[in-house]
Amino acid sequence: MAADHNAFITEATIEGDADAEGPLAGTTVAVKDNISTAGVRTTCGSEMLADYVPPYSATVVDRLTEAGATIVGKANMDEFGMGTTTETSAFGPTRNPADPERVPGGSSGGSAAAVAAGDADVALGSDTGGSVRCPAAFCGVVGIKPTYGLVSRYGLIAYANSLEQIGPIAGTVEEAAAALDAIAGPDPHDGTTRDLSEVEGADPDPSYAAAADGDVDGLTVGVPTELFDGADERVVETVEDAIADLEDRGAETTEISLPSVEHAVQAYYVIAMAEASSNLARFDGVRYGHRAESDGNWNESFAETRDEGFGAEVKRRILLGTYALSAGYHDKYYKKAQDARAWVRQDFEDAFADVDVIASPTMPVLPFELGESLDDPLRMYLADANTTPVNLANLPAISVPAGEADGLPVGLQLVGPKFDEETVIRAASAVEDAN
Amino acid sequence: MSDTSESTDAADADGAGDADASAGADAAAVDADEVRHVADLARVRLADDEVETFAAQFGDILDYFEALDEVPETEREEELVNVMRPDEVESGLAQEEALSNAEETEDGYFVGPKVS
């Protein structure tokens, strides 16, 4: 069954603790192939790491197996997480179980497709600019992007460290929340993780699964005009219906404005590409990964190795990131992008003074047809308009199915204040109940 | 000990899909020489057709990034603090594990390409 959608790069079993009790005992999990699994190859969807076998597991993998979950395979993905469709994978595209002629979204497309097709109960993805929420929306499942610092990135092969978090994908809000309960929490191996008892205003002992109670009575939902402008009308209608369902259940909605988000995609791509150009410098064929058979000196050997190992989108981002950081351009691109990031963060903070959550379409478009956007990178980047602001602001967000348009899944995105995952989970569970 | 068992033929796996992406690139702010220069800095060898495709695409993408000029200078209130801990000796990767993914090793060392 799995082969039908090409959801997995590697099918392999890592048994969970058979004595564990709790909601994850006996569940099956697909793990995105940029998350390290000891003894099971971890490719990042790239020729560069086609034969790379990590000697250790990511913290999130250990936590899942300790909670009784069994890993069933490594999920397909855009190469190094760079894409919105899972078509940049060196292992071929994944098909969307909701419509096999369409993409599953990306970059965690294999993870979402595995859950949507029933090949796994739960999946892990990573979300740098929407890579958990986009495929969740396109495949009609639930995806959570946690607050930066809630989940350990130890063992996640880095693309853009300052933006990315590992997050769960599942068929229901409660299942995704239960997986988050298992993987969240401080980790001495990742100095950016936070202990919630030391975070001002955060619930020191959250239960995310318990928050999926559907109770939105009195909740204030902000609806930002900027994240609806320019979206496909069919998407907007479906999302507005879902927001109306929240109102029927006692939530109040109010229109808000987030002017900074008009610059989020630009800022996101400059920052992500800059970080990628630095992170991916490690792939030189010496310590791990593909190595070209080169007669040249080390510079020539590295360049040939990286030519052979990286696909077009990865090269594009490394080169643009290098350009944006190079002498004469740093202030123009990178510094301005950091200004934009601070502005987006401030905008959200101001908004959360008045509202509890912010609702919008997850993706402004319906799932692309296979091959539709591959030749036009800028068009693919623009599809990330609604998801990238959340990463820039380090906030928690969830994509929950809002319904269908023309038979295709549409996702509603709910964004909350820092470390208030419980509120976005609660609101999402109400959307789910109404469907 | 050297291990050269692996030699995948990845050379043709990329780039081919972007053959006609140059259509519609009218404001090419980047020329082929600049693409070659950046590729050189980043240690990525490019084929000539890749250089042409990237030059056109980079023009479009950088044009789009121009809008960052409209962003006001923003007070950056970073709440960032250094996370420190005392140094403690603990076990890490064994040498054998650390070397296990290297294409070529010798006497417990990585073997890199020649320097010149």
Image: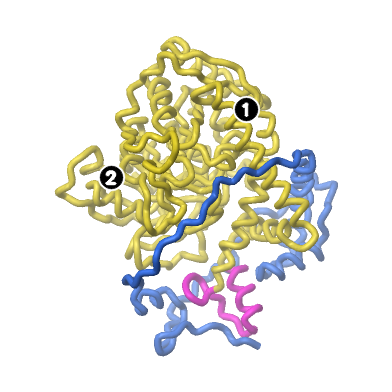
Residues shaded magenta: A285-308
Q: Report the chain shown in blue.
A: B
Residue at 42% from the left image edge and 56% from the top image edge: A190
Pick the front one: A112 or A193: A193
Position of A30 relative to A355 (above/below): below
Q: Nearer the viewer, mark 1 or mark 2?
A: 1
Residue under numbered circle 1: A227
Q: State which chain disc 1 sits on.
A: A
User: How far across and how far down the image is residue A9, in percent?
Assistant: 41, 55
Check disc 1 and give the amino acid type. Leu
Q: Report the chain shown in yellow.
A: A
Q: State which chain disc 2 sits on.
A: A
Residue at 39% from the left image edge and 69% from the top image edge: B87
Pick the front one: A247 or A231: A247
Residue under numbered circle 2: A28
The quarter in which the N terminus of chain A is drawn is top left
